[in-house]
Image (spheres, coloured by chain):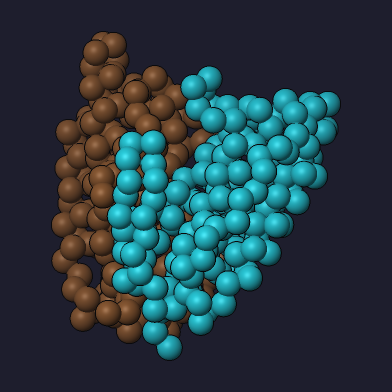
Chain colours: A cyan, B brown
């Protein structure tokens, strides 16, 4: 079987988000052991002009959801950004995973040449499906999952790269 | 044309490493403007028990080089880890990019089911080519490029996610 657009997107997003949940649970447990409120850790940043942990998670979820939807040619669902506890964050990720898993191979395979238009603050970007996945969605999903990991790591959570990569 | 193992590996690695060079150049310029020695910034870490900037770059390069070689069924080349200046780091990345570009589509396409064995500190891991690329190499390349970005960002470099994602 040859690599397909579905295999390079949905299962990769699901795996990244599942690993993100595992990393967050270790961060949450560390914060609880230290008596740190959920809201404080969720608002922690590497540096004041970077986005806080909760936003890193929200963007990772949105990138995966929008990635799958756009590859499938469907208008992406919108999720409200209102999480203030870790339980709500886990639920947000679980909803993103369920949404992403809702797209089947028959919807995403063959999307290599699908025209995808993104409205960015800096203007419109035009991609074909393959470049959108490889040059935009995957780097973004991993960027935000890694930055969430780095925030938790810097906050003292005992996690290693194996937690980010996940089990095999 | 359908997505191939080559397209999901070599050009993605090259793009990530080129963007890494661009981010490092901004970090280097910032350090020079502040009178910070190359060696000091290259040894900067997010937290003392994480790897320093130079090591993040070396691992990103190695992941890409070994990823391409193993998918092609070739014994990966070994690169010495001895960079102490940004010029040497740029050269290391350039050698990694040249090495990765040395593999052609005809060597990597069809590697979905190639058996790949990794010797890790924790034991041996057995992958097929597709899982190795999607579950190990790509997350690792982006993890180390993102962590390098985060170290530079935390050190005060004026970079944004657009620098990490690169031009389109």
Q: Quadrant of the N terminus of chain B?
A: bottom left
- B49 left or right of A135? right
The residue sitting at 39% across, 46% down in the picture is A119
Q: Is residue B105 left or right of residue B163?
A: left
Q: Nearer the viewer, residue B143 or B88?
A: B143
Where residue A1 sits: x, y (%)? 43, 88
Q: Quadrant of residue B32?
A: top left
Q: x, y percentage for residue A39?
A: 75, 29
Residue A122: percent from the left, percent from the top? 33, 36
Image position of A141 (left or right of A129)? right
Quarter of the rendering containing residue B123 = bottom right
Q: In which image quadrant can residue A28 be found?
A: top right
Residue at 30%, 26% in the rendered image? B27
Mark yes or no: residue A65 visible.
Answer: yes
Left/right of residue B10 with respect to residue A136 in the rendered view: left
Q: Is residue B71 above or below residue B15?
A: below
Is A117 situated above or below A80?
A: below
Q: Nearer the viewer, residue B38 or B5?
A: B5
Residue at the image position 55 percent from the left and 58 percent from the top:
A76
Can I make out residue B81 in this image?
A: no
Query: Is residue A17 placed above or below B38 in the rendered structure?
Result: below
Residue ID at (45%, 49%): A140
Give percent across and percent down for residue B4.
32, 76
Outermost residue toward the front in this view: A75
Q: Count all numbered tags in the image, as a single digit.
A: 0
């Amino acid at each position: 079987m040859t690599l397909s657009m579905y295999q390079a997107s949905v299962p990769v997003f699901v795996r990244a988000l599942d690993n993100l949940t595992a990393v967050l649970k270790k961060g949450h447990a560390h914060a609880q052991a230290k008596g740190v409120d959920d809201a404080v850790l969720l608002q922690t940043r590497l540096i004041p002009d970077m986005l806080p942990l909760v936003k890193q998670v929200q963007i990772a979820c949105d990138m995966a959801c929008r990635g799958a939807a756009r590859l499938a040619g469907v208008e992406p669902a919108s999720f409200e950004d209102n999480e203030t506890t870790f339980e709500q964050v886990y639920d947000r990720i679980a909803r993103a995973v369920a949404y992403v898993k809702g797209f089947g191979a028959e919807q995403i395979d063959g999307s290599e040449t699908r025209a995808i238009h993104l409205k960015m603050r800096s203007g419109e970007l035009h991609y074909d499906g393959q470049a959108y996945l490889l040059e935009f969605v995957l780097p973004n999903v991993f960027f935000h999952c890694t930055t969430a990991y780095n925030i938790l790591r810097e906050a003292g959570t005992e996690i290693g790269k194996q937690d980010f990569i996940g089990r095999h």
